[in-house]
Image (tube, helix red, strand yellow):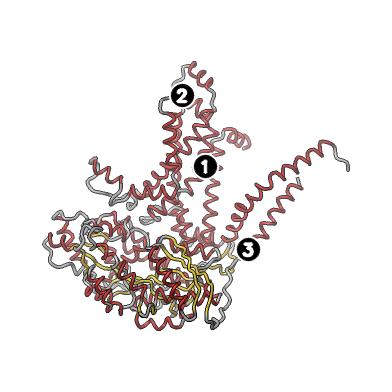
């Protein structure tokens, strides 16, 4: 009996020892020594962590980078491998990776993940290792620069930066006898009811409110359009809970779904991508979508309403909107090794900055994404590029796009590391108010209290 | 001290048994024991922004989950949602699969084909199943809406996963569809062990179908029923996660925020690994309670032993 007990006690002791020996805390990387001056570097292998989006093009861009780096000074013999997951799961992908003690050398990020990853020490300030990053600041649109900044330090260079636009179906409005698109949310309701009553669309307004990251892109765009302010510069919650722009916006959505019935309850099950599909199909008159979707809306063969989608300034008191930024960050793993660090910084600059390729100095990769995929860009100077202007003019009125981009702001509160936790509750709680399962004032009060508790 | 032959034999046999068991035991300890102990250890730790602060806070995470104003309401909501889902899903799976098992236990033409068809839902991998149901339920182009619209049951497309009153049941339906076959085959295996002579004796006593089922089939099937209940409860508490992840992400509102979803969110979205681990342990305890109840309530011998003991 005791022998048997002894056997199991031994095994348990082994487990306890193993647990005690396991690293309880990821160790901080040693301070990186200054990269040595060298005529050539490598061979180096980098790992790029990104979400799946037009990977064939990403691979071509990586090939171009490898060739460009090999010809540079110092010449870098570099090979880049890419690990990717879907955008919706990318935060989890990165979190599990770092929690498991692994790092990326370079990784994509969305603006709302930066604070969380930077606070955890998974990514490092780009400007600390690449002071040249600061030189781009003057040519980066303010909301994008703000989105790439955490605790006063610039962490990345932009992959793309886009703006949430109010888009309407010109033909549907014309058929309903509406000459000018709405400029206030009350007018949106009025015009949508006209369209519905004339039988032109049963769901004239579609805005994706499925729980997920598009939820807050849409909601913040609407908050801002009414002049909403959620947080002050010190990240203190300042929004009113029983009146004001935030309250009015949520109430407008609730009324549109439950009373006016210009927006179907199924919007709770739709992302911006679902909205895009429905709008392309001619199901709606008004949608809020990111600018890059305009390309597909107006492309014959892929859209039933090609040529009929138009951008308009966001309805509301201020016409402001939400601008979002995707960026390239430097992973903490890259700075522990000189050669990796140099190659990683060059990769970030090649992808997110201005480089000279075949004697031409340009934001080559950002330009390629904008021309070929319609992705918005963080560099206003690209507007003066004839190729970019031509591509964007084919998909929308670029004057309206420029005006709207000038009124774009990044999501307030995003620089707080607890933003991810808070926004998760915003999604679920606001949905309840939109479906009239809870009172808007109660929801906003709860969200304000939650923000304050999380900040402690 | 001289050992008798029996003692020597016993010692050799025991040592041999341990040697035989060692590989399996090592596997269990490495892949189950170690992670289990490690997750308990994590649940005692404080994390801030994905990194342990180095403070061992013992049961503070557990206390926060049960009492704090930020986490407790979500936990209790998820607990309720999970219990509702589990009760409905387990009951439905057991009743439907037992019904189907009774049917396919009979000999009739096409029986083998039916068995083969039944296997299909279970053979579909979980993530594929979730994506498939996402398409079926889609409020814009989903097959379900298309079908109901064409036969005139609905006038316009509607949402299941976007409706707080329907979302959980939409997930439950997809879950039941997948897990009925598994239990069905367990029941079929159980039914095949009941001797035909018992049925014949009951029929000679002029017992009806329902009476035979209640007095013969069900009691003799009790061990299988217990096993199905235990397995299905474990499945229902955990294996709906893929459906929630793909179909609703816990919404709308908190309508489908089950404990499994909340644990995922706490750990991987909020990077509160300590709290996530604590919730996972609490979920395991809930599972143990369920299993204990099944084993005691559905086991007449244990029940009577406890009664006599009292």
Which one is earlier in the sequence, the residue at label 1 or at label 2? 2
Which label belongs to residue B231?
A: 1
Q: Are marks 3 and 2 in contact (CB under 8 Å)?
A: no
Q: Closer to the camera: disc 3 or disc 1?
A: 3
Q: In which quarter of the image is residue B220?
A: top right
**Residue linked to disc 2:** B211
Q: Do the residues labelled 1 and 2 touch (CB within 8 Å)?
A: no
The correct choice, above or below, for B84 with respect to A20 in the image is: above
The correct choice, above or below, for B42 with respect to B237 in the image is: below
Which chain contains the residue that carries disc 3? Answer: A
Q: Quadrant of the N terminus of chain B?
A: top right
On the picture, is A81 further left or further right than A313? right
Q: Closer to the camera: disc 3 or disc 2?
A: 3
Residue at x 54%, y 83% (from the top left corner)? A37
In percent of width and height, residue A117 lies at 47, 70
On the picture, is A103 further left or further right than A439? right
Which label belongs to residue A22?
A: 3
Residue at x 40%, y 73% (from the top left corner)? A351
């Amino acid at each position: 009996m005791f022998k048997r007990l002894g056997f199991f006690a031994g095994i348990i002791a082994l487990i306890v020892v193993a647990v005690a020996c396991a690293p309880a805390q990821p160790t901080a990387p040693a301070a990186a020594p200054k990269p040595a001056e060298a005529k050539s570097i490598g061979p180096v292998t980098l790992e790029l962590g990104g979400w799946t989006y037009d990977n064939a093009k990403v691979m071509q861009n990586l090939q171009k980078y490898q060739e460009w780096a090999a010809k540079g000074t110092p010449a870098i013999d570099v090979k880049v491998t890419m690990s990717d997951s879907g955008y919706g799961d990318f935060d989890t992908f990165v979190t599990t990776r770092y929690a498991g003690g692994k790092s990326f050398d370079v990784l994509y990020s969305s603006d709302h993940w930066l604070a969380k990853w930077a606070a955890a020490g998974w990514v490092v300030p780009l400007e600390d290792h690449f002071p040249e990053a600061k030189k781009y600041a003057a040519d980066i649109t303010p909301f994008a620069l703000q989105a790439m900044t955490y605790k006063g330090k610039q962490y990345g260079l932009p992959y793309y930066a886009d703006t949430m636009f109010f888009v309407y179906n010109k033909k549907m409005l014309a058929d309903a006898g509406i000459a000018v698109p709405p400029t206030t949310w009350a007018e949106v309701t009025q015009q949508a009811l006209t369209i519905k009553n004339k039988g032109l669309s049963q769901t004239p307004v579609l805005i994706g409110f499925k729980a997920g990251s598009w939820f807050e892109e849409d909601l913040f765009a609407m908050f801002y359009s009414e002049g909403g302010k959620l947080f002050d510069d010190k990240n203190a919650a300042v929004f009113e809970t029983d009146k004001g722009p935030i309250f009015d916006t949520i109430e407008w959505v609730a009324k549109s779904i439950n009373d006016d019935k210009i927006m179907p309850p199924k919007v709770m099950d739709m992302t911006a991508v679902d909205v895009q599909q429905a709008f392309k199909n001619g199901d709606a008159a008004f949608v809020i979508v990111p600018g890059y979707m305009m390309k597909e809306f107006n492309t014959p063969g892929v859209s039933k309403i090609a040529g009929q989608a138009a951008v308009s300034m966001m309805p509301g008191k201020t016409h402001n909107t939400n601008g979002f930024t995707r960026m390239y960050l430097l992973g903490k793993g890259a700075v522990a090794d000189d050669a990796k660090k140099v190659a990683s910084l060059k990769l970030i600059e090649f992808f997110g900055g201005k480089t000279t390729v075949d004697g031409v100095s340009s934001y080559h990769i950002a330009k390629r994404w904008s021309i070929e995929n319609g992705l918005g860009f963080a560099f206003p100077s690209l507007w003066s590029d004839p190729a970019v202007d031509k591509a964007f003019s084919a998909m929308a009125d670029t004057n309206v796009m420029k005006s709207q981009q000038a009124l774009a702001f990044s999501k307030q509160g995003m620089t707080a590391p607890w933003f991810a936790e808070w926004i998760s509750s915003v999604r679920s709680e606001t949905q309840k108010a939109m479906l009239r399962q809870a009172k808007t004032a109660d929801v906003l009060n709860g969200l304000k209290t939650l923000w304050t508790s999380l900040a402690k | 001290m001289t050992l008798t032959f029996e003692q020597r034999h016993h010692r050799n046999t025991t040592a041999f048994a341990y040697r035989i068991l060692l590989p399996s035991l090592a596997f269990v300890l490495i892949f189950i024991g170690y992670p289990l102990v490690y997750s308990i250890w994590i649940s005692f730790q404080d994390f801030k922004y994905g990194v342990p602060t180095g403070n061992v806070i013992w049961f503070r995470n557990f206390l926060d989950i049960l009492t704090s104003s930020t986490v407790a309401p979500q936990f209790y909501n998820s607990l309720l949602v999970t219990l509702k889902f589990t009760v409905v899903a387990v009951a439905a799976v057991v009743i439907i699969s037992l019904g189907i098992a009774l049917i396919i236990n009979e000999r009739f033409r096409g029986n083998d084909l039916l068995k083969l068809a039944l296997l299909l839902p279970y053979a579909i991998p979980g993530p594929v199943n979730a994506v498939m149901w996402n398409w079926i339920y889609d409020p814009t182009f989903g097959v379900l809406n298309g079908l109901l619209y064409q036969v005139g049951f609905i006038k316009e497309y509607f949402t299941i996963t976007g409706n707080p009153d329907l979302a959980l049941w939409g997930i439950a339906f997809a879950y039941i569809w997948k897990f009925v076959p598994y239990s069905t085959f367990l029941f079929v295996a159980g039914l095949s062990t009941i001797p035909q002579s018992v049925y014949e004796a009951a029929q000679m006593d002029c017992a009806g179908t329902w009476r035979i089922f209640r007095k013969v089939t069900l009691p003799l099937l009790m061990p299988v029923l217990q096993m199905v209940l235990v397995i299905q409860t474990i499945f229902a508490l955990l294996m709906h996660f893929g459906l929630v992840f793909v179909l609703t992400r816990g919404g709308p509102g908190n309508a489908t925020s089950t404990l499994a979803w909340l644990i995922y969110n706490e750990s991987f979205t909020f990077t509160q690994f300590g709290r996530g681990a604590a919730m996972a342990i609490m979920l395991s305890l809930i599972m143990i309670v369920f299993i204990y109840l099944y084993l005691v309530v559905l086991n007449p011998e244990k029940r009577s032993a406890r009664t006599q003991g009292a």
